[in-house]
Image (cartoon, rainbow, N blue to C red):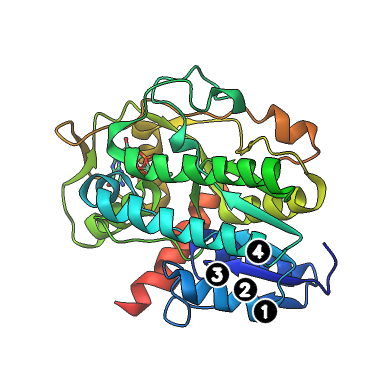
Amino acid sequence: MNVTDRIYVAGHKGLVGSAIMRALEQQGYSHLITRSSSELDLRDRQQVDDFFETEEIDYVFLAAAKVGGIAANNDYPADFIRDNLLIQTNVIDAAYRAKVQKLMFLGSTCIYPKYAPQPLKEEHLLTGELEPTNMPYAIAKIAGINMCQSYNRQYGTRFISVMPTNLYGPGDNFDLHTSHVLPALIRKFHEAKVQNQPVVEVWGTGNPKREFLHSDDLADACIYLMKNYEDSEIVNIGVGEDIAIKDLAGMIMEIVGYQGEISFNSSIPDGTPRKLVDVSKINALGWTAQTPLAEGLQELYRTFQTEFLVKQ
Ligand code: GFB
């Protein structure tokens, strides 16, 4: 990938896409192509075909997707499977027909089987039952990975797929119903502090474990793999360490400076018990995550204050 190549970042306003944009800009890439969803509806095949026909794109980061936390996945299953299947099918197929040099598809570690052995190795995909709360999302993402592999096999394309662990960073979603756990807890503890609430509710039992990767680290890994990885097999992107939700709540409580109590609402699902990724493959390829969780959480709290609170 040369600095003058024409690079399309699909989903450039999202958590992942915006991080990839920042990293590409910093590294001097000068032909970045973007479209907002109002300019180009990726669910519309004709619009996507017209866009690829006119733009002469060399590289694609396919970071456009409908995403959300455990509640959003559970409540909007039809939207998650339909929108993701449409977006990825349209973009992958148009990229093939427009002869782009290379495309990266973003999977997720939440599409591994619910009870896969830990740490999750790339070969564990499709070896067991999925987590019910996000099965529609997982089935769409698995279809996307298989579509890239099938196109490579039949058409000789260079489409690669990566499996990021749970992400956080600038541009995160702080909506309490649709967000992931990190932004949700930052907002809940902050609001409880300023409103002097005695108790903060954390969903589930607090026992599930999750691994968290800063979106800037993910972007760095994606660009690194776009330049250095050619295989059809998926690659995990993570830090290789996880934390129980109850310990995470304790860390966030301290960062925010909240001094009340935590209550666990076990009537809300825990989701997958654990999804620690095995990062030995990406480490062996020459990439390692850099941002420690404590540092990233402090930054996310600042992001919440500067990006979210000021708009309230
Ligand atoms: O981040 P999260 O929504 O996504 O939840 P998943 C992680 C864990 O935190 C779950 C618990 O066990 C939640 O029950 N949790 C505790 C909370 N308090 C809260 C809260 O206030 N808000 C939220 N959201 N969670 C998603 C998938 O699963 O992971 C998506 O559903 C996606 O498809 C994403 O791939 C990476 O890790 O459970």
Q: In terms of sequence position, does the residue under pointer 2 or pointer 3 come before the other?
A: 3
Labels 2 and 4 touching (C-beta < 8 A): yes
Residues tagged 1 and 2 counted as in contact (Cβ below 8 A): yes
Q: What residue is disc 4 on?
A: 97
What residue is at 26 percent from the left and 51 percent from the top?
78
Q: Amino acid at mark 4?
A: Arg
Alpha-carbon distance for marks 4 and 3?
22 Å
**Residue 123 location (% of width, % of height):** 60, 24
Q: Amino acid at mark 1?
A: Glu
Q: Which residue is mark 3?
A: 12
Q: Which residue is mark 1?
A: 55
* Mark 4 surroundings: few (<14), some (14-19) or many (≥20) residues within 10 A: few
**Camera-nearest residue between 259 and 23:** 23
Q: Is residue 202 left or right of residue 167?
A: left
**Which tag is nearer the camera, tag 2 or tag 4?**
4
* Label 2 – label 4 distance at C-alpha: 9 Å
